[in-house]
Image (spheres, helix red, strand yellow):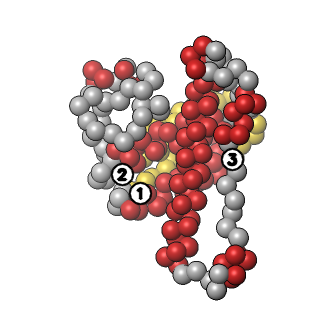
Amino acid sequence: VASGVCPDESRLRHLRPDFPQPDRRRESQRGGEIDDEARHMINRIQENSRRLLHMINDILDLSKIEAGKMEFYPETVDLYALLDDILGMFSLRCKEKDLWMKVQKPDESARFVITDAKRLKQVLINFIGNSVKFTQKGGIDVIVKNTPVHNSLSMLTFSVTDTGRGIPKEQCESIFEPFQQVKGTYSEGTGLG
């Protein structure tokens, strides 16, 4: 096995658990409804569990890329709904940090696109997540532009910009290497993004 990649994906499936949804019957068996603060904390735990699962899946996908086994599954996707879903994931964190987040969606003609929704979400979650993580003041802009290419074909360009500290020009290329981060700054990340 080269590069620590497991050639048999079936061995890795047990690492992708499903997280159960809250069972309202259990709440009543414990003596009644839980208060709003406890419900909020439970929701945060579940959301963080989902994020951890996404991180594990991203690591497994990185192994697939290195092994040349990455597959794409194009389908018709409602881009507006996909963007709303992704931005919803970060709304609480932005509110906690007092950051604004604005999205500029493409015109209605590009609402439904053919793409691999899972892969597009991974990329956008990574970029937006980094913007939220490294922005202390101000906010984040997510802009999607639709550029006609030929006949009915268009190219979408996704742009995520923020008011964070930025990356020095001399380090821009190196951050795309595995496990690399901006030098001279502390980060809680791993450099996998």
Q: CA distance from mark 1 to mark 2?
A: 8 Å
* Image quadrant in which the N terminus is located: top right
Disc 1 + disc 2, Cβ < 8 Å: yes
Three-letter amino acid code of the residue under disc 1? Cys
Residue depth check, mark 3 versus mark 1: number of the one nearer the observer: 3
Q: Is residue 92 above or below residue 158?
A: below
Residue farthest along the left direction in this orientation: 184
Disc 3 + disc 1, Cβ < 8 Å: no
Q: CA distance from mark 3 to mark 1?
A: 28 Å
Q: Nearer the viewer, residue 43 or 12?
A: 12
- Say which label, 3 or 2, has the lower sequence index: 3
- Identify the residue at image location x=66%, y=40%: 15
Name the secondary structure under disc 3. Answer: loop
Residue depth check, mark 1 versus mark 2: number of the one nearer the observer: 1
Q: Residues within 10 Å of mark 3 (few under 14, many from 20)?
A: few
Residue depth check, mark 3 versus mark 2: number of the one nearer the observer: 3
Q: Is residue 128 above or below residue 157?
A: below
Q: Nearer the viewer, residue 79 or 58?
A: 58
Q: Which mark identifies residue 17?
A: 3
Residue 34 rendering spot, x and y as whole percentages: 58, 80
Name the secondary structure under disc 2. Answer: strand
Q: Residues within 10 Å of mark 1 (few under 14, many from 20)?
A: many
- Identify the residue at image location x=37%, y=20%: 173
Q: CA distance from mark 3 to mark 2?
A: 34 Å
Three-letter amino acid code of the residue under disc 3? Pro
Residue 108 rendering spot, x and y as whole percentages: 65, 47
- Say which label, 3 or 1, has the lower sequence index: 3
Would you name the residue on which mark 2 appears? Answer: 139
Q: Residue 148: tell me if it is visible.
A: no
Would you name the residue on which mark 1 appears? Answer: 94
Three-letter amino acid code of the residue under disc 2? Gly
Residue 153 rendering spot, x and y as whole percentages: 69, 28
